[in-house]
Amino acid sequence: MFKKILIANRGEIACRVIKTAKRMGIATVAVYSDADKDALHVEMADEAIHIGPAPANQSYLLIETIIEACKATGAEAVHPGYGFLSERAAFAEALKAAGIIFIGPNVRAIEAMGDKIESKKFANAAKISTVPGYLGVIESPEHAVRISDEIGYPVMIKASAGGGGKGMRIAYSSGEVAEGFARAKSEAASSFGDDRVFVEKFIVNPRHIEIQVLGDKHGNVIFLGERECSIQRRNQKVIEEAPSPLLDEATRQKMGEQAVALAKAVQYDSAGTVEFVAGQDKSFFFLEMNTRLQVEHPVTELITGVDLVEEMIRSAYGEKLRIKQSDIKLNGWAVESRVYAEDPTRNFMPSTGRLTVYRPPAEGVENGVTVRNDTGVYEGGEISIFYDPMIAKLVTHASTRAQAIAVQAHALDAFAIDGIRHNIPFLSALMAHPRWQSGDLSTGFIAEEFPQGFHLIEPEGNTLEAMAAIGTSIDHRMNERKRHISGQLRAATPVRFTRERVVALGEKRIPLIIESEGETLALRFNESGRTITIQSEWRPGQPVWHGIVDGKPVAAQVRSIINGVMVSYSGTSSIVRVFTKREAELESLMPPRIEADTSKSLICPMPGLVKALSVTVGQEIKAGEMLCIVEAMKMENVLRAERDGTIAKIYAKEGDSLAVDAVIMEFA
């Protein structure tokens, strides 16, 4: 077996590979850019070597630099993770020429399947059903429009070397094709070093289902069931699960056999994924093959018990597969949520900065339920503008889909992050969504269910009372603490405190009475007449409140603010303030806060780099017209005019780095 391997990647996938390598007794080498010198994968590895500046095209994408790092450290093999150089045949060739093993498929397989255009040609030749499209390289926007007109709208413009949602655009008209072509080419060049794109028909109301395959260098190939990744936004997966709630055993077998046949045709000898677009009627079409480890591989690992990273390493070393197709049994259900540094209430714009709080839920297996958190960050670390905004992958496994979802929802409530914006409230809202829970999915789910974008759920019913109870419990604990500081309230006659409270959640006012206190707090809600009991060992300063509310375990993210606490629970977040009856009367007399008028300004919605300015001072603009492009975390975001007007002032220039809420320009 290898004695030392280098991981040509960063973040959570580098940490993931290091964990398996250490368990196998293999030494590891991390590589890092200027931005990653203090990263978690650098700390976890046995050795680390600097490879260049922060931009990926000056560090993680430099083949010769990675090879020099291998030579300098004596690494015998390289695991590429996903993204970056993982599907570059030139990288595998260069490693081979240098006498270094590539922990991935053979070059022929990468060339045949890793290139999205070539893979479709190969699949057509193998008589595998594919999505209608143009399989050649698109040379210009005009060429893209002609092809799209022939295929019929809507169409998908995709980077040939792409993945992870980068370099992908859906176009519903010729005008959208021209702009999408330019954006897709630019993103593909910056993310993959390859700006080729192609066009294919976009299937309406589809489901995204993929088959995990595993091969060795002795001609053996098996499949490990399927994953469904239909919950996506901007063509990037958000929630993944295994198995799929759509498939029956017969369809699963057909898809698996087709995936294995395709893999065998190119002598596939590592872990890979054959992706399909499926109709609601269980029809399916080959989409592409990813010749690498997928981001969502943990759900497959949890339902099969197979460590895919270990099998990749063993295959690269030349070992035969230790498992046969008949050994693969799907056990239970697994759900994965991708936790991103982004603001879901601002159209999922990326967020950067320091993680002042990072407290994931406890990992482990208890009563047949698994919680797993794959991450590459730590409390106090930085989220950089240069790379993908994923913070962690939270994975849960249980005997049934409903149970796996319930455990995932609880784990999300127990996941505390502060210092940057994050998408946990959105993920929690998804877990509670009836359509998601029923398994009625499509890749248009988010656009269909959140057509106006995501807004925090307004708490009501049991959720409202639970948040009020949590806030009251915290307020009660804080008041107890205050009474004992420096011996305060040490009177001959005990002081009697009123038990009436009014809990303010946003605009709502909830009157209640504290019926009993001690180890168990009992609260009676005036309006519903319900009495809720609460038990908790929460202490001031803890970012997650754990307790038993009405006999059920509850977790909520909490953050102290002036005269109150911010509570995030079950897909919603609200400031909770607890008043005595007299305080509530006085508070009702306070004038409302008036927000500043920003309607005549273009505000930067995320930290990023001004890639292009499309207007000048004095120019008249129409609603929907492009104003500028801001690049953040490898994605180009087009900012458009919301209404007709005239450009009065421009404060930014191309190349400027802007903070969130920075004013880019003003309108007359």
Image: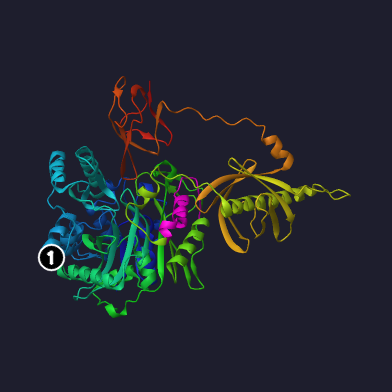
Q: Name the residue at the right extreme.
A: 492
Q: Position of residue 249 (x, y in %)?
A: 30, 73
Is residue 136 toward the left or the right of residue 368 in the image?
left
Amino acid under disc 1: Lys
Vertical position of residue 643 compared to residue 123: above or below: above
Answer with the quarter of the image where residue 324 lies. Answer: bottom left
- Front residue of 322/378: it is 322
Q: Residue at the location (65% across, 55% down)?
A: 539
Segment tinted magenta in the rendering = 415-437
Q: Position of residue 650 (x, y in %)?
A: 35, 24
- Front residue of 98/438: it is 438
Quadrant of the image for the C terminus? Answer: top left
Q: Secondary structure at mark 1?
A: loop
Q: Residue at the location (15% across, 67% down)?
A: 266
**Badge count:** 1
Quadrant of the image for the N terminus? Answer: bottom left
